[in-house]
Amino acid sequence: MPKEGPRIQAVPGTPSVETETTLPEYLALRGEPVEFRALIRQISFAAKKVAAELRVAGLQGMLGGTGRTNVQGESVQRLDEYANAVFVNNLLRSPAISDLVSEEIPDEMHLARHHLGQYALLFDPIDGSSNLDVNLALGSIFSVRRANDVLADGHAQIAAGYVMYGPATVCVLAMPQHGVNLFTYEPSIGEFLYTRGPVHMPAEGAAYGVNEANAAGWSPRVRDYVAWLRGPAEHATRYSGALVGDFHRILIKGGVYLYPADVKNRRGKLRLLYEAAPLALIAGLAGGRAVSEDRDILDIRATEIHQRVPLILGSRTEVDRFLPPTSPGAAAQRP
Ligand code: F6P
C-alpha cells in the first residue's frame, strides 16, 4: 500500500498543515509532472463550476430534460448538457490532452491537431442524472490514460477519480503510486483541500446496493448471490440510483454495489471506460475489487468507447464471494 507522502512543517500548536494542502499543492508535493497537474486543475475547475451550478439550478430553471436522448438512448437532462459543455470547454484549454471521450458525445474527440498532449481523458460529466431533479448526490467520474491507451485494459489508467456533489463536494483521486486520496471542496476559498488518505476500504461491509426491481431478469447466480447478501451475510440495502454516491459509501464503510446483466440490459448497464474501470482502479488501490461476470474489470480491453459491462464492485469479501471458485479471476485470488 502507498505510504503517506511528505508533510509540510506545521507550526507547533496549529492544525496539521497537511489537511490544508490544496489539491494542486498535494500533486506538486508528490512530484507529479506539470502537465498532469494542469490536467487535474482543469478537471477540478470544471467540477467547481458544475458544483456551483447544481446549487442554484432549481432557481435558474436548469432542471428537467432537454427532450433529447444521448448515444446510449438515455434521456438527456439540461444539466447533463451543461456539465458536458463545462468539462469539454475546460479540457480543450489544456494542452496536456489530446483525446476526450465523454458519455454525452458519440465519438472520441481527437484534439491532436491543436494539442501536443500526451493524455486521454474519459469521463462521465454527470453520473446519476435521475437524482438531478430531486437534489440528491451526483457525481462526475474520470479516467486518465496515455493517448494511445484509450481502449487498453484498465491497468493502463494513470489516474482515476470522481467528484461527488453531496452535502459536501469531495474529490477522490486514485493513482497507482499514491493510492486513493480524498479532498473536500472549501467554497470560501475555492479549493479542494486534502482531507484523508491513502484511503483503505474495509475488507467487508454491512450493506449492498442494487436495483432490485430488475431481479426477475437476473441470472440464477445473481439471484443466489443477492439472497446470500440479504440472508446469511445480513447486509442492509442501500441504493440511491447514483453510482458515485453508492460507491462512495462503500469506499468509506465497505459493502458491495452491483449492476449485473439482466434481460433488459444483456451486457450490463454501466459503461466500462468511464464508469466501471475508473471505479475499479479506485477500489483496487483502496484494497477492494471490481469484477464483471467472471473476470476482473481491470483485465477487460474495450472494443468500443461506450461499451457496457456487468459490474460487481466493493469490498474484497463480498466481491470474492461472487466469483465461482473455478473462474480464472477466482483462481488468481484464491490459491
Ligand atoms: O448511468 C449510470 C446510473 O445512473 C448510475 O449512476 C446508477 O447507479 C444507475 O445508472 C442507476 O440505474 P437504474 O435507474 O436502472 O437503477
Image: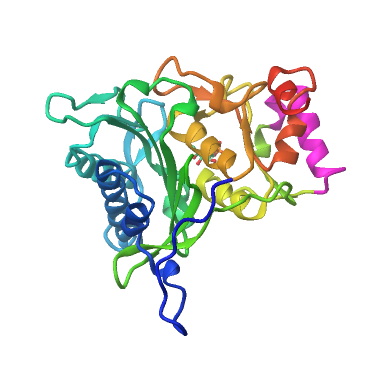
Residue in the picture at 62% in, 48% down: 239
Q: Position of residue 66 (x, y in %)?
A: 30, 40
Tell which residue pokes out farthest to the right in this image: 232
| Most foreground residue, 169 or 61 | 169
- Residue 123 on the magenta span: no
Residue in the picture at 59% in, 45% down: 1
Tell which residue pokes out farthest to the left in this image: 114
Q: Quadrant of residue 187?
A: bottom left
Q: Position of residue 224 (x, y in %)?
A: 81, 30
Residue in the picture at 36% in, 56% down: 29
Main SS of the magenta part reads: helix
Residue 170 visible in the shown view: yes
- 240 versus 144 height, above or below: below
Q: Position of residue 13 (x, y in %)?
A: 47, 85
Magenta segment range? 215-234
Residue in the picture at 43% in, 40% down: 160
